Image: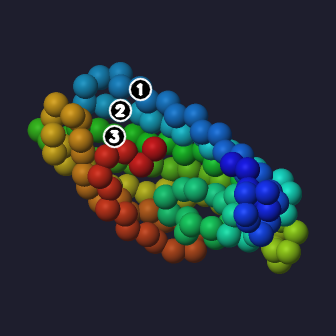
Amino acid sequence: MFLGSWLGGDNDFERYTGTARFYWDPSPRFVLAARLQGQGVSGDPPFYALPFISLKGIPVMRYQGETAASVDGEVRWNVWKRWWVVAFAGAGWTDDAPGLSKEGESVNAGGFGFRYLLARRLGLQAGIDVAKGPEEYAIYVVAGSLF
């Protein structure tokens, strides 16, 4: 993403994001998923455009820096008919950014949840997740896949 005064903005900066996703279902009742995400910025970005760690259980934009990376995984198991249970965990890292009072940080988060298969032909699931990060718990209402 390129932003700048030449486009009518107040700041000249670039933001880069890359994401890799992996899904594997060794059996119809068991699914493994993983995601790796990296973000970077150059130039003079405002604080709200800095890269941040993106994980369930971590508040958005809590951990920011000039670069941020996160890796997380999820295991889903079909326990009965249309009902699935989910367990997930992840880790993230960010470096320090000029103007922020804290140095680079690494954090971990994880949790569990359940899903109900709404539409078999589409594979559409909905449910609730409970996640725990370093500071607090979070509850997520989920429809589809979070990654």
Percent across and percent down for residue 18 are: 65, 40
Check disc 1 and give the amino acid type. Trp
Residue at screen point 31% across, 46% down: 144
Locate the C terminus by quadrant.
top left
The answer to whether marks 2 and 1 mark residues whose Cβ atoms lie closer than 8 Å is: yes
- Residue 68 got which mark? none
Instruction: Please report whichever mark, 3 or 1, sits nearer to the chain's N-terminal start.
Output: 1
Label 3: element kind: strand
Residue at screen point 69% across, 48% down: 1
Quote the CA–CA distance across marks 3 and 1: 11 Å
Check disc 3 and give the amino acid type. Arg
Residue receiving disc 3: 76
Instruction: Please report whichever mark, 2 or 1, sits nearer to the chain's N-terminal start.
Output: 1
Front residue of 94/109: it is: 94
Check disc 2 and give the amino acid type. Val
Q: Residues within 10 Å of mark 2 (few under 14, many from 20)?
A: some
Residue receiving disc 2: 31
Position of 64 relative to 86 (above/below): below
Q: Is residue 41 visible?
A: no
Residue receiving disc 1: 24
Percent across and percent down for residue 13 are: 80, 57
The answer to whether marks 2 and 3 mark residues whose Cβ atoms lie closer than 8 Å is: yes
